[in-house]
Image (cartoon, grey):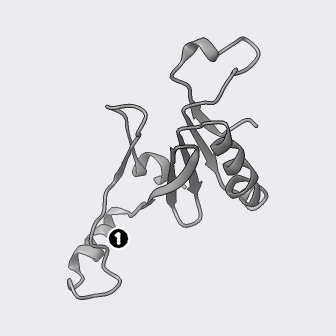
Amino acid sequence: FIPDVMIVCNKDIITDLNIQGAPDLVVEVLSPSTAKNDKGIKKDIYEKFGVKEYWIVNTVDKSVEVYLNNNGRFYLDNVYAYLTDEEIAENNNMSDNDIDKIKEYTDFIKVSICDNLIVKLKDIFEYV
């Protein structure tokens, strides 16, 4: 597979022709033609071969599913949803009792494989 984005921390597995091992982070951006494979066979293969973190980016609903590998199995760590400034203001104006109010919101994803690396959701979705 050729992921949409990947991070490889071990430079020793990078060759002129390819990567000789599993990347540490793989990001796939869903499209109608790739969604089934990205959520199915690719996710299973990345899991099997030891990818530590797998992101599925959905540009339609502006969300990112983050899976972390624990003992050879991916588990869903979190789903991050991008909100515009207007949507954040609207959410903040909702009553705390409103079932649609988002109680916990973060505008970034902390990459688990790198202590100081965060990705802002705005950087992913602002122009989508």
Q: What SS does tag 1 mark?
A: helix
One can see residue 65 in this view: no
Instruction: Residue lying at the far front in this picture: please name it.
Output: 71
> Number of callouts in the render?
1
Specify few, some or many for label 1: CA neighbours under 10 Å numbering under 14, 14-19, or 20 or more. Answer: few
Locate residue 31 relative to residue 111 in the image: left or right.
Answer: right
Mark 1: which amino acid? Glu
Locate residue 72 relative to residue 77 in the image: left or right.
Answer: right
Q: Is residue 80 above or below residue 22?
A: below
Residue 30 place in picture, x, y as percent? 66, 55
Identify which residue, 13 or 26, lies in the foreground: 13
Q: Is residue 118 above or below residue 96?
A: above
Q: Is residue 103 above or below residue 64?
A: below
Locate residue 101 relative to residue 20 in the image: left or right.
Answer: left
Q: Residue at x 35, y 70 (%)?
A: 87
Q: Is residue 23 above or below residue 39?
A: above
One can see residue 31 in this view: yes
Q: Residue at x 33, y 68 (%)?
A: 86
Answer with the quarter of the image where residue 80 lies: bottom left
Rendered-image quadrant of the C terminus: bottom right
Residue 35 place in picture, x, y as percent? 71, 59
Q: Residue at x 30, y 63 (%)?
A: 105
Rendered-image quadrant of the N terminus: top right
Q: Residue at x 69, y 50 (%)?
A: 44
Residue 79 place in picture, x, y as percent? 46, 61
Locate residue 121 relative to residue 48 in the image: left or right.
Answer: left
Q: Which residue is mark 1?
A: 87
